[in-house]
Image (tube, rainbow, N blue to C red):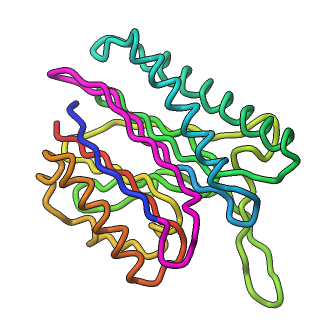
Amino acid sequence: MKLLQGFYSDVGSTRSVNQDSILCRMIENKKNSFAIVAVCDGIGGLEHGEIASRIICECINETFDEIATWIDVDTVDADIIVSHMKDAVEEANQRLFDYKIMHGMQTGTTMSLLILLREYYYIIQVGDSRVYLMRYGFLRQLTVDATVSSMVNGRMKSYLSNYMGKDQDVFYTVEEGSIRRDDLFVVCCDGFYHNLKVEDLNFDRRIFNSPDKANDKCRELVHLMMNRGDKDNITVGMVFARG
């Protein structure tokens, strides 16, 4: 399966620091691709979420670089790749946990990690960033938010129940499925999906033939969410399965 990527991240209209981090990497040959997209959203109510999100993406990127030295995209066992990425997530969580202990601070980040290899996708999920799949004109959320709700002053509020760096041992969920031609995967933070509409993703997929145009489309969508009133940092990465 041939895959094409685009991404964009913006500090937003009111924040002074972008606490989001995004990682988009890909290895491909004439027939197949191995790609990852990770979106991490630093926890706003804690300290230095931008450091937390960066630590996680840096660790995952190191693992990708290591895999790139030996991978054969056509023949590698998917279980091996997913196992390496799980190890990367656990190592990243340990680094972040050690960092916050060393500096005597409370920090953390969400993480949605999308892995695509040949005709299959895998998701390692912590927190409430999300992965969506747009297929045949229908948009489906592939991840489950790690949130709990409670009544406060007569109003229902949701709170994040799990995130990277919360504890020394990280709890994550794993989802998997098959990729079909013309699938569009969207990996994003809550600043993006709060105001997302299905029709926003009905654009000409030929833009993915140019990385610059794909990134421009992601930027256009981020600014659209800002214009709809979201004041948070906003980040999105997209992967299109050209077939």
**Quarter holding residue 60:** top right
Image coords of residue 154 (percent x, y): 80, 90
For residue 31: magenta?
Answer: yes
Over which residues does the magenta segment extend? 11-39
Residue at image coords 49%, 16%:
80
Q: Height in image: 145 above or below 61?
A: below
Side of 233 where 202 appears, left or right: left
Q: Height in image: 29 above or below 157?
A: above
Q: Height in image: 73 above or below 208?
A: above
Side of 98 where 11 appears, left or right: left
**Quarter holding residue 25:** top left
Q: Quadrant of the C terminus?
A: top left
**Quarter holding residue 140:** bottom left
Q: Nearer the viewer, residue 132 or 88?
A: 88
Q: Nearer the viewer, residue 88 or 19?
A: 19
Image coords of residue 167 (percent x, y): 81, 42
Q: Height in image: 177 above or below 22?
A: above
Image coords of residue 208 (percent x, y): 18, 49
Side of 76 where 124 appears, left or right: right
For residue 137: magenta?
Answer: no
Residue at image coords 39%, 40%:
24
